[in-house]
Image (tube, rainbow, N blue to C red):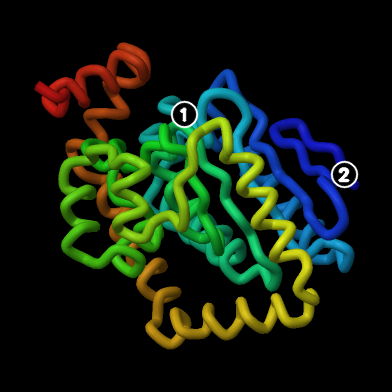
Amino acid sequence: MSSYETMIYEKVEDHIFRLTLNRPEKLNAMSQKLLGELDQVMSEYESDDSASVLIIRGAGRAFCAGYDLQPTQRQGSGFTVHSDRLGLQKMVDRWQRLWALPKPVIAQVHGYCLAGATEFVGHCDIVFASDDAQFGHPAGRSLGILPTLSMWPILMGPRKAKEYFFTGDLMSAQEALDWHLVNRVFPKDRLEAETLDYARRVATVPLELLTLHKAAVNRYLDVLGFRALEQSAADLDCIAHQTEAAKGFMKASRERGLKAALSERDRPFAKR
């Protein structure tokens, strides 16, 4: 089994493997290094005939705070519509590959699951969350749309998706359960045990049948055309990055720092 810098990939027990995002000091924000290692883990999991189910979790206080923003790279001299669109299409390809893995993938979510992290869990097969989990896309207030829309319009319908996209507000674990973004919610101290218990039940089913169950359900969304939907959303995100709002936010991030730019952006949305 390979060794990774930004994640831990391990065998838990027979047929059950676990991937832990391991950048707790950054709330497991997804850097280019982490995303590259995720690609390697997907290949390793897919090719391992002894692996029937994969659990994905985050180390530390949160599952994942989204993409690791690099203000010096975006909107710089090397940032063009072509490079941006190419990068976004590759991102969509990555999440669609996760969705298309032939074997079950379970997300175990606690704490923040924001922006790009909602794309991550949106393309897992099953999502279990702790009662302290929070989901949302606050970056939509300044940076653009999610390249895949995180499956939100499909999973919870267009009206509820718009409600949260329009404001960037966070939804609780219970709201996410009510609107079909997660399968089950557990107390935080029971999340890991409950997730593993479910994974054990999955692992008792022969792998050949698991792959066929997954393929049969996934084909439903293929028929609906969700792949084209996500590729189209990525093109719109590319357009969003050329807006004055997005350029202004990245300029503020470079000049005053990301923390200050985020504070200024989110101040009008603070709960009163």
As displayed, is residue 13 above or below residue 206?
above
- What residue lies at 36% left-to-right and 60% top-to-bottom? 180
Q: Nearer the viewer, residue 108 or 147?
A: 108
Name the element at disc 1.
loop
- What residue lies at 34% left-to-right and 50% top-to-bottom? 176
- What residue lies at 52% left-to-right and 42% top-to-bottom? 109
Give x and y (percent) for residue 231.
41, 68
Give x and y (percent) for residue 150.
39, 57
Gap in angstroms between the C-alphas marked 2 and 1: 28 Å
Q: Nearer the viewer, mark 2 or mark 1?
A: 2
Give x and y (percent) for residue 12.
82, 46
Residue type at tag 2 = Ser
- Which tag, 2 or 1, sits closer to the chain's start? 2
Residue type at tag 1 = Gln
Can I make out residue 162 in this image?
yes
As displayed, is residue 77 above or below residue 212?
above
Q: Nearer the viewer, residue 120 or 271?
A: 271
Can I make out residue 77 in this image?
no
Contact (CB < 8 A) between labels 2 and 1?
no
The residue where tag 1 is placed is 70
Total number of numbered discs in the rendering = 2
The residue where tag 2 is placed is 2
Name the element at disc 2.
loop
Q: Quadrant of the C terminus?
A: top left
